[in-house]
């Protein structure tokens, strides 16, 4: 597996950057409110812009390797997520995701992938689709909370939501920021496979009335292997007219999932 390509794919489990709001509310100052109100407040603070154009730095650390890359992110809500990575100013990889397709290529090993979400799901150890990826990028819950039944409690300076009925295949927890009802953290666990995907949002920025993660930490555990990615946004613009150029170069070798 080529590490730069994996960085880009894993970053598709993350987000957008300018006043900073830290998650420092004292637990004793958090109001006790109903689970329904927590969920409604979360969706009332959903993302309302049409596009995001951002520049960010990403630091990757795996079992044997580490790397830092610069990334341009372009996102058109519900339609396209596009990323282009450079190292020391040199283009090294590109990703384009639509609701039905995942495409990427990397120049170091001259490989590419063009298919569904199976590669992304395999690398992250949990089933993903376009909506889940976009929600993670925007600080929203990966599941539609209005379609499930949840318990809530105050834990670690957050509103913690957990399903009332356990899932036999995986467990999931949501930790809501009591100030803006965006996510402090969300976790997906597969106990049988010893897999954990955790996405944390240490603080948020306010941009044109929108609350967005300023930094994001991703931690993916697969048995004894731990992968971490730290994201920091350098700049963000909304509602800019975007293009998503993508063409797999000739002579590149297709990645196999076997």
Image: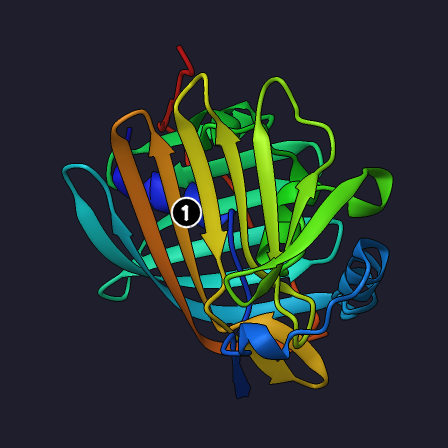
Q: Quadrant of the C terminus?
A: top left
Question: Where does residue 4 sit, x and y in percent of width and height?
Answer: 30, 44
Q: Which residue is mark 1?
A: 8
Q: Quadrant of the N terminus?
A: top left
Q: Residue at x 76, y 50 (%)?
A: 78
Q: Nearer the viewer, residue 238 or 60?
A: 60
The secondary element bearing badge 1 is classed as helix
Q: Residue at x 84, y 62 (%)?
A: 37
The furthest residue to the bottom: 19
Left of 251 or right of it: where is 87?
A: left
Question: Where does residue 144 sit, x and y in percent of width and height?
Answer: 78, 43
The furthest residue to the front: 28
- Quarter where residue 87 is shown: bottom left
Q: Residue at x 79, y 54 (%)?
A: 35
Q: Residue at x 41, y 47 (%)?
A: 8
Classify 146 as above or below 213. Answer: above
């Amino acid at each position: 597996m080529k590490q730069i390509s994996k960085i880009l794919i894993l970053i598709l489990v993350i987000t957008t950057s300018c006043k900073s709001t830290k998650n420092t509310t004292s637990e004793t100052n958090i109001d006790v409110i109903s689970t329904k109100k927590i969920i409604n407040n979360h969706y009332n603070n959903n993302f309302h812009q049409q596009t995001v154009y951002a520049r960010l730095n990403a630091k990757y650390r795996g079992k044997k390797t580490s790397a830092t890359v610069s990334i341009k992110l372009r996102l058109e809500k519900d339609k396209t997520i596009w990323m282009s990575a450079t190292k020391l100013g040199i283009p090294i990889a590109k990703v384009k995701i639509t609701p039905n397709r995942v495409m990427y290529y990397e120049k170091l090993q001259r490989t590419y992938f063009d298919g569904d979400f199976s590669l992304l799901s395999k690398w992250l150890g949990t089933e993903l689709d376009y909506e889940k990826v976009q929600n993670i990028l925007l600080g929203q819950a990966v599941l539609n909370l209005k379609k499930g039944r949840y318990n809530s409690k105050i834990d670690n300076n957050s509103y913690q939501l957990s399903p009332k009925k356990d899932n036999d295949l995986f467990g999931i927890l949501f930790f809501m920021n009591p100030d803006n009802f965006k996510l402090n953290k969300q976790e997906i666990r597969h106990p049988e496979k010893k897999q954990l995907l955790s996405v944390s949002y240490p603080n948020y920025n306010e941009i044109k009335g929108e609350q967005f993660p300023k930094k994001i930490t991703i931690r993916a555990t697969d048995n004894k292997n731990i992968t971490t990615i730290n994201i920091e946004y350098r700049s963000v613009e909304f509602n800019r007219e975007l293009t998503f150029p993508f063409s797999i170069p000739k002579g590149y070798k297709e990645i196999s999932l076997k």
